[in-house]
């Protein structure tokens, strides 16, 4: 009898013309037979494979550069396609030796592929960027803020324009990393009715090259919106900017008064 598809999955990805899925709360990664163009159905193989170093559940899968990245809570592995599949139960994938990474995934939906590498929130609530096979922590400037939320498990990561964005639904906050200036900013949506900032309304984004547009999935009413730097409103509401400078003590902790403040502004179109 043909193998049944997994009912609940932690992760799902298309890799080497196959659909791969992680059975929920297990180490088992299920896969289909190769899918050809025009196929309307898929056939799941009656076997599975598991990572070698992840002793806990597999939390997410990502594919890029002809490699499969398998995330666990405390470690990460890189696998590749072998093409060896002589019987129905053969798995045509193998672990890349020496590519085990001793840093796991703290938020399953925080991992993403963008700007030629991988990005994710690890088990220590730090944002890391993979450089070669080495994860580099990039969130040192906001480490204290990332430890403040009650949870990061529901954090979602996506990229848009030059930014990598992580939004935290439970704690109503969004952080964005500028890949050009190597700096962080808090993104928010100003609510005029409550006079407070809420998390950024976007939670995912896709770029359509034919239209040269970024389409963003919103979390408020399941809307699909367009992001463009020339726009001056968020869903019709004004964009309210708050810029907080660094602290200057001028060599003393005594109270000080500023008599003048100079600003240089450029008016938008």
Image: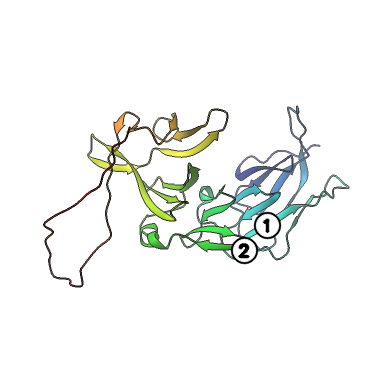
If you read the primary sequence from the N terminus, does the residue marked by circle 1 or circle 2 appear first?
A: 1
Q: Position of residue 199 (x, y in %)?
A: 36, 43
**Can residue 137 be seen?**
yes
Residue at the image position 27 percent from the left and 40 percent from the top: 240
Asked if the residue at tag 2 contacts the one at tag 1, i.e. Cβ–Cβ closer than 8 Å, the answer is: yes
Q: Vertical placement of 53 versus 49: above or below?
A: below
**Can residue 50 be seen?**
no
Q: Circle 2 is placed at which residue position?
A: 101
Rounded to the nearest angstrom, the CA distance separating label 1 from label 2 is 8 Å
Left or right of 206: which side holds 184?
left
Q: Quadrant of residue 37?
A: top right
Q: Quadrant of residue 57?
A: bottom right
In the image, which disc is placed on residue 118? none
Instruction: Label 2: state its secondary structure.
Output: loop
Q: Quadrant of residue 78?
A: bottom right
How is the protein colored in the picture?
rainbow
Instruction: Label 1: state its secondary structure.
Output: strand
Disc 1 packing (10 Å; few <14; some 14–19; many ≥20): many
Q: Position of residue 177 (x, y in %)?
A: 44, 51
In the image, which disc is placed on residue 78? 1
Q: Position of residue 248 (x, y in %)?
A: 23, 64
Q: Vertical placement of 43 versus 71: above or below?
A: above
Residue at the image position 20 percent from the left and 69 percent from the top: 250
The quadrant of the image that shows the N terminus is top right
Q: Vertical placement of 86 versus 189: above or below?
A: below
Disc 2 packing (10 Å; few <14; some 14–19; many ≥20): some
Q: Position of residue 195 (x, y in %)?
A: 22, 39
């Amino acid at each position: 009898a043909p193998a049944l598809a997994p009912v609940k999955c932690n992760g799902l990805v298309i890799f080497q013309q196959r659909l791969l899925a992680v059975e929920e709360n297990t180490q088992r990664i299920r896969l289909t037979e190769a899918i050809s163009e025009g196929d309307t159905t898929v056939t799941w193989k009656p076997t599975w494979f598991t990572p070698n170093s992840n002793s806990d559940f597999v939390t997410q899968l990502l594919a890029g550069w002809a490699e499969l990245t398998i995330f666990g809570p405390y470690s990460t592995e890189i696998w590749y396609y072998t093409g060896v599949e002589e019987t129905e139960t053969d798995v045509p994938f193998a672990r890349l030796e020496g590519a085990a990474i001793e840093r796991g995934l703290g938020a399953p939906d925080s991992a993403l592929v963008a700007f030629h590498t991988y990005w994710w929130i690890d088990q220590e609530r730090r944002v890391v960027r993979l450089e070669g096979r080495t994860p580099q922590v990039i969130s040192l400037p906001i480490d204290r803020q990332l430890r403040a939320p009650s949870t990061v498990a529901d954090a979602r990561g996506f990229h848009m324009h030059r930014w990598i964005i992580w939004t935290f639904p439970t704690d109503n906050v969004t952080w964005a990393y500028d890949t050009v200036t190597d700096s962080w900013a808090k993104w928010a949506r100003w609510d005029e009715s409550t006079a407070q900032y809420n998390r950024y309304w976007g939670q995912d984004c896709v770029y359509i090259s034919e239209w040269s547009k970024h389409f963003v999935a919103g979390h408020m009413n399941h809307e699909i919106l367009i992001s463009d730097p020339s726009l001056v409103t968020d869903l019709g509401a004004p964009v309210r900017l708050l810029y907080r400078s660094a602290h200057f003590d001028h060599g003393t902790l005594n109270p000080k008064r500023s008599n003048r403040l100079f600003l240089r502004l450029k008016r938008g179109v």
